[in-house]
Amino acid sequence: MESQKQFKRRFSFEFFPPKTDQGKEKLQTVRNKLAEVDPDFFSVTFGAGGSTRDRTIETVLNLHRQGISTAPHLSCVGGTRQEIGELLDVYKENGINRIVALRGDMPSGMGAAGEMRYANELVEFIREHSGDTFNLEVAAYPEFHPQARSAEDDLQNFARKVKAGANSAITQYFFNADSYFYFIDRLEKMDVTIPVVPGIMPIINFSNLVRFSDMCGAEIPRWIRKQLEAYGDDSDSIRKFGEEVVTDMCEKLLKAGAPGLHFYTLNQAEPSLSIWKNLGVSEREKISF
Ligand SMILES: Cc1cc2nc3c(=O)[nH]c(=O)nc-3n(C[C@H](O)[C@H](O)[C@H](O)COP(=O)(O)OP(=O)(O)OC[C@H]3O[C@@H](n4cnc5c(N)ncnc54)[C@H](O)[C@@H]3O)c2cc1C
């Protein structure tokens, strides 16, 4: 973990772009609550194949204007260089300085894969098109990406994204800190030493978590799954147990030197805030764990 200890810690919250007016109002309330703890930035996801393009732009610019730096996610599957270039120009004109650059996944039934096949090509394109305007974040997979041919291949892919110009990374969520430590160790052996910030998924709803984890290849350890299962419909107990388990893991990650945390909020303030408060991030001035 030595490579990670040198970086200043940063804390961020991720949202998805709301579809309805009611969703927008709710996100505004969530934003206000999370803004109180003064995170380093917010980020906003980009729907598969560009399906949320306009809503992502609108949400990003709206949040960014309110004073906390906001980073759009941008995926390349299904998009052309021209379309992506235009989007980059919009962000640049509006003072956006960070982008989460991804390959993304094509939704089933949607056409061609686009002009870029993998995230390293997108990173390369953004550097070509926009120089150093943006701080580029890429995705990292401590439990390895589900489509990777092997663990080694996935690590090589990550290294390719760094070589193409990524400044830092955010991980897929995980519930086993050792997978993250091992991943960092493997990167260090390859001399890949950018900040890799753990992505943190608060546990809110068991069936959604299982469905989503199966899709994205995140493992729910058996002891957590069994305990959550045992709570059945008792959502208070699920949240309480989830909060405890995830707080403990975050504490372990930060103590070991993780360069911050990125919360997948699912557009809800309380689950991420409770973990944040348990950790005492603000009181400890974000740096002195
Ligand atoms: C922090 C974070 C944020 C995310 N935000 C979004 C979002 O907003 N919208 C969204 O749709 N999805 C999002 N995702 C999900 C992501 O789009 C998917 O996980 C997607 O399947 C992979 O994207 P990637 O950028 O990691 O792809 P890549 O880094 O391109 O990797 C994809 C797969 O291809 C393999 N690979 C890469 N290069 C090669 C090569 N040259 N030859 C063969 N195999 C190769 C890799 O090993 C991996 O298995 C996010 C994921 C994370 C971790």
Image: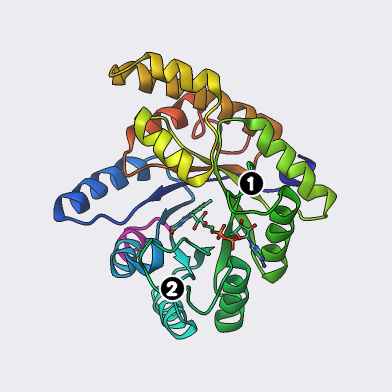
Residue 22 disc label: none
Determine which residue is flagged by label 1: 144
- Mark 2 C-beta to ligand 1 under 8 Å: no
Question: In the figure, is residue 58 to the left or right of 156?
Answer: left
Q: Residue at x 51, y 64 (%)?
A: 98
Question: In the figure, is residue 256 to the left or right of 74?
Answer: right
Locate residue 225, reporting x and y percent.
47, 22
Going by the numbered disc 1, the residue's amino acid type is Phe
Q: CA distance from mark 2 to mark 1?
A: 23 Å
Asked whether residue 65 is drawn in magenta, I would say: yes
Which badge, 2 or 1, is on the more N-terminal residue?
2
Furthest residue to the left?
21
Within the displayed image, which quadrant is ligand 1 positioned in? Answer: bottom right
- Mark 1 C-beta to ligand 1 under 8 Å: yes
Question: Quarter of the image holding residue 265?
Answer: top left
Q: Which residues are magenta?
A: 61-70
Question: In the figure, is residue 283 to the left or right of 184?
Answer: left
Q: Is residue 13 visible?
A: yes
Question: Between residues 169 and 132, which one lies in front from this camera angle?
Answer: 169
Question: Quarter of the image holding residue 184?
Answer: top right
Determine which residue is flagged by label 2: 78
Query: Dot 2: what SS?
Result: loop
Locate residue 150, reporting x and y percent.
71, 50
Q: Residue at x 76, y 51 (%)?
A: 152
Asked whether residue 75 is drawn in magenta, I would say: no
* Quadrant assignment for the N terminus: top right
Locate residue 171, reporting x and y percent.
58, 47
Furthest residue to the front?
109
Going by the numbered disc 2, the residue's amino acid type is Gly
Q: Is residue 182 above or below residue 108?
A: above
Q: Is residue 286 above or below residue 62?
A: above
For mark 1, does the 10 Å Cα neighbourhood hold few (<14), some (14 to 19), or many (20 or more) residues?
many
